[in-house]
């Protein structure tokens, strides 16, 4: 549900981390230790936030995947049960279909 929004937020964080990394290189070249440490702390916070969003996205995808997998397994089992029934009771099954068509009036 929120997968698109999470993806957009992760992309935005990646851009921000990239910008701060560039600023970090500049601060290192200039030799400003205080600014360098501030940028490192900002990058750490953004990386932690990105990790939390990535974990949230994984949990979201697992929530969506579970009903889909359960539905697929249920449908596959239903088909297998019908096929098994067809193997054992071919005549009964065919006559039931013919009888149901007759009673419905085609």
Image (spheres, rainbow, N blue to C red):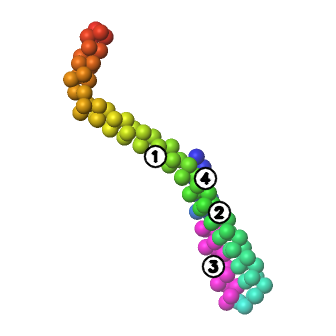
Is label 3 or label 4 in front?
4
Instruction: Verify whether residue 67 appears in magenta.
Output: no
Residue on which the image places disc 1: 69
Q: Main secondary structure of the magenta part?
A: helix
In the picture as drawn, the residue positioned furthest to the front comes out as: 88
Residue on which the image places disc 2: 52
**Which disc is residue 92 wearing?**
none
Instruction: Verify whether residue 22 appears in magenta.
Output: yes
Residue on which the image places disc 4: 5
- Of callouts 3 and 1, which one flags the residue occurring earlier in the amino acid sequence? 3
- Of callouts 1 and 2, which one flags the residue occurring earlier in the amino acid sequence? 2
- Of callouts 4 and 1, which one flags the residue occurring earlier in the amino acid sequence? 4
Q: Which residues are magenta?
A: 14-29
Please provide percent x and percent y for residue 89.
Answer: 25, 27
Tell me if 44 is positioned left or right of 95 in this view.
right
* The quarter of the displayed image where residue 36 is located: bottom right
Classify 10 Å Cα crowding around label 2: few (below 14), some (14-19), many (20 and above): few
Q: Secondary structure at mark 2?
A: helix
Q: Secondary structure at mark 1?
A: helix
Q: Work out whether residue 34 or residue 101 is closer to the camera in this orientation and state it.
A: 101
Q: Is residue 23 visible?
A: yes
Classify 10 Å Cα crowding around label 4: few (below 14), some (14-19), many (20 and above): few
Is label 3 or label 1 in front?
1
Residue on which the image places disc 3: 22
Classify 10 Å Cα crowding around label 3: few (below 14), some (14-19), many (20 and above): few
Separation of marks 3 and 1 at Cα, in angstroms: 44 Å
Is label 3 or label 2 in front?
2
Is label 4 or label 1 in front?
1
Please provide percent x and percent y for residue 75.
Answer: 39, 38
- Of callouts 3 and 2, which one flags the residue occurring earlier in the amino acid sequence? 3
Q: Work out whether residue 105 or residue 31 is closer to the camera in this orientation and state it.
A: 105
């Amino acid at each position: 549900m929120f997968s698109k929004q999470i993806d957009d937020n992760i992309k935005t964080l990646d851009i921000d981390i990239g910008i701060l990394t560039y600023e970090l290189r500049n601060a290192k070249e200039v030799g400003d230790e205080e600014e360098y440490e501030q940028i490192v702390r900002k990058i750490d916070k953004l990386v932690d936030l990105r990790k939390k969003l990535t974990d949230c996205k994984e949990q979201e995808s697992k929530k969506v995947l579970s009903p889909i997998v359960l539905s697929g397994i249920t449908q596959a089992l239903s088909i297998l049960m019908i096929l098994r029934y067809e193997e054992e009771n071919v005549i009964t099954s065919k006559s039931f279909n013919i009888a149901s068509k007759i009673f419905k009036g085609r």
